[in-house]
Image (cartoon, rainbow, N blue to C red):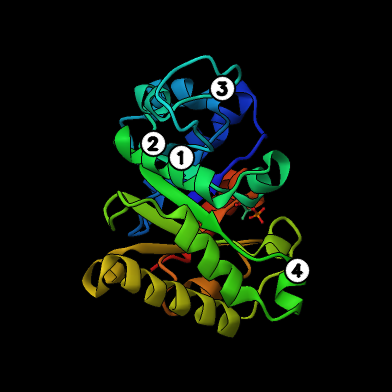
Amino acid sequence: MAGNWKMYGKTAALAEIRGLLDLLGKGPRPAADIMICPPSTLLAQAHYAFGKRDILLGGQDCHPVPEGAHTGDISAEMLADVGATAVIVGHSERRRDHGETDALVAAKAAAAHRAGLTAIICIGETEQERREGATLAVVGRQLDGSLPPSATAENSIIAYEPVWAIGTGLTPTPRDVAEVHGFIRDSLGGRLGREEAAKIRILYGGSVKPSNARELLAVGNVNGALVGGASLKAADFYAILSAYS
Ligand code: PEP
């Protein structure tokens, strides 16, 4: 269960991680791995303050190479150095804002593996692609192109995030989610073999909230959620985590 803070949060936002840890300490602890992916400016502070506790930390993007003349970029090794154990790659906002291709996303995922990080590889169709009935074709193409040869169930997580559901309050029906997640599982079987594909975690992402988390998490082949807006507030994220079983 991962929270993607996107480009939200200054130092004061660390109080939300503290608040989440408090809630987790008081109530029943969900049987999930719990991760926050804050802006990279907060990673080191979050790691030193809370890194030994119940919450894993992840980055939101990485450059394919370990170091070099790439102003403004951050490598997977640098994320690992400040306590990240995972990194999101290929989020639709990066594909949209930075023109990231599947090949670049695969290179970033391979970089994550090289640095010992889990790659959370995001895929998902646009509203128009869904309207045109191209969802499975798009998801299949993105999965194929974004998964590097180094991917295993141990070092990779797939996040299915329909672009039209991100930050909009809209969600696919449980039946639609089941169809796409089942398709992803089958496609992974073709790439990694059935046994490995059965173990890989497939997250759903897109407007997951306390009010819909239980229904979405109960869908077959949904192994967790990637949560954006609702992960910014400890109480909301805790309510979503509580829906995990
Ligand atoms: C995301 O950023 O990955 C996301 C799913 O956002 P939201 O939950 O706000 O739709």
Residue 185 in the image: above or below residue 208: below
Residue 108: mark: 1
Distance between mark 3 and mark 2 Cα atoms: 20 Å
Distance between mark 2 and mark 1 Cα atoms: 5 Å
Sort mark 4 into few (<14), some (14-19) or many (20+) by Cα contacts within 10 Å: some
**3 or 4: mark nearer the eye:** 4
Circles 2 and 1: CB atoms closer than 8 Å: yes
Question: Residue at (28%, 55%) from the top-left corner?
Answer: 152
Is residue 16 among the parts visible in the rendering?
yes
Q: Earlier in the sequence, mark 1 or mark 3?
A: 3
- Circle 2 sits on which residue? 111
Q: The disc labelled 2 sits on which kind of residue?
A: Ala
Residue 204, image x, y percentages: 52, 64
Asked if residue 70 lies left or right of residue 199, the reply is right
- Circle 3 sits on which residue? 41
Task: Compare residues 223 and 66 and report the one nearer the observer.
Answer: 66
Q: Earlier in the sequence, mark 1 or mark 4?
A: 1
Distance between mark 1 and mark 3 Cα atoms: 20 Å
**2 or 4: mark nearer the eye:** 2
Of helix, strand and loop, which one carries label 2? Answer: helix
